Image (cartoon, helix red, strand yellow):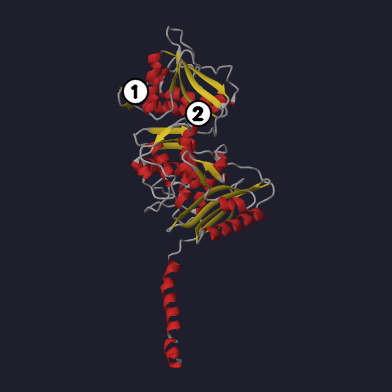
Amino acid sequence: MTARRNRLAPVGPFLIILVLVMLLPLKGLAAPYAAMVMDARTGEVLHSENADARLHPASLTKMMTLYIAFTAVRNGEISLDDDIKISRHAASEPPSKLGLQTGQKIKFRYLIRAAAVKSANDAATAIGEALEGSEAAFARRMNATAKALGMTRTSFKNAHGLTEDGHLSTARDMTMLGRHLLYDFPEYYNLFSRQSTFAGLREVSNTNRRLLSAYRGADGIKTGYTRAAGFNLVSSAKRGDERIIATVFGGSSSASRNAKVAELLDLGFKRAPSHAPVNAPDTPVYADIGHASGKTIRLQTAVSTSLRPKMRPGVAVPDTVADTAVAVAMADVIEATVAEVAEETVQLAGIASVTPKVRPEELEVVTRVSTSGGRHWGINVGRYPSHYKAERVLLQTALNEMSTLDGSLRKVVKKPTGFDANFLGLTRETADLACRRLQARNQTCFMIGPAS
């Protein structure tokens, strides 16, 4: 018995050495680590490590998908209650997913919830296809938006963040994107702190719920994981007047990632001043964003330099709006949108090709109701959270659709759930044509009858 035990004794150490040799290469397979901590109020970087290394972002990508979705809703490109038909491509995305089926319809708001809370890949792809027609076209818009936001080392290839060659970002760029989500879309930011939400098909749980529950003040933002990326997280927490954003790439597990993020948030609160002025990031100017249809959209979503509306020579500023904030914003919108209309030829299936003409120099900005017979119809182009946003969409729509909306009245109607943007004083035929043309551009529109 003793002799047998002696013969087997060397096997133990040999196996240990063999296992260690086999495990050594695995260390090199660990995803690279990167981190950044930022004072959200000022944008000051409080800590960074490897923050500019281009790494796999995983589902942090969905922060950009959601940023564009929020932008599209605000600009009237799409409504939260629009029904989106799910493509075979979106339905076939691998988990994490909501479970969408090819051909089914679901409201846009539920796709947003599923992408933000559950990190559903099928929902993210459906958002991209709904806005741009294809995921490739949406990726181009993502990259143009990233450029406008100053994300200089980011390149997107898809809407969900699954590993793809060239789909890369940095801890710095993702921290900046998280800050923009916070300040540019405060009305939607609460999505990221929901422990669960109803997403049309079922209730879904937040992938970040453990940190949200465990860390005092945590209220977002987005997790991510793939084998190539490791465990990623962009998190924000608020305590008193202080708000910190911390980003981690390359965590070895969700637990270790959460512990590291908590450590970085603590560091941020320790280093940040108790009181600091809020210096919100500049709202980006989107220019030359190519869409699948070949159309170019130029939108300026904030007034940065104009202190007064710049009216055309010889045109007086209407007394009723000369000193209002709306007039200030409308001037820059007119300038940008008229330039677009002047160079754009709209070709829509089933509708004759129309080239919008630039209005003459003696254009009056104030519209009027036509008194010609039969003009008792109107159209609605969406419901918006503020009077200003509804007015703005009306102006942009009027300038883009001069041929059918010229002479109509722009009217904002306050409703319990928002502000309706309406054009009134149209014939039934003109209202129908205008809606068909706007819907062909994927813009919300429905007709308003005489009794509405």
The residue shown at (56%, 42%) is: 182
Residue 444 on image: x %, y %: 44, 27
Residue 312 on image: x %, y %: 48, 21
Task: Depth check: give the residue in front, 320 or 189.
Answer: 189
Q: Which residue is mark 2?
A: 332
389 lies above or below 406: below
Numbered-mark total: 2
Q: Dot 2: within a 10 Å radius of its alpha carbon, few (fewer than 14), some, or many (20 or more) residues?
A: many
* Secondary structure beneath label 2: helix
The residue shown at (59%, 50%) is: 212
393 lies above or below 54: above
Q: Where, by quadrant of the figure, is residue 9 drawn?
A: bottom left
Q: Where, by quadrant of the figure, is residue 290 drawn?
A: top left
Label 1, label 2: how many angstroms apart (C-alpha)? Answer: 23 Å
Three-letter amino acid code of the residue under disc 1: Thr
Residue contact at pointers 1 and 2, CB within 8 angstroms: no
Q: Dot 1: within a 10 Å radius of its alpha carbon, few (fewer than 14), some, or many (20 or more) residues?
A: some
Label annotation for residue 311 = none
Can residue 245 be seen from the camera position used here? no
308 lies above or below 207: above
Task: Depth check: give the residue in front, 353 or 322.
Answer: 353
18 with respect to 314 (left or right): left
Task: Depth check: give the residue in front, 158 or 338.
Answer: 158
Tell us which disc is closer to us: 1 or 2.
1
* Secondary structure beneath label 1: loop
167 lies above or below 328: below
Three-letter amino acid code of the residue under disc 2: Asp
Residue 391 on image: x %, y %: 52, 24
| Extreme residue in the bottom direction | 3
Can residue 372 be seen from the camera position used here? yes
The tag earlier along the polypeptide, 1 or 2, is 2
Q: Which residue is mark 1?
A: 355
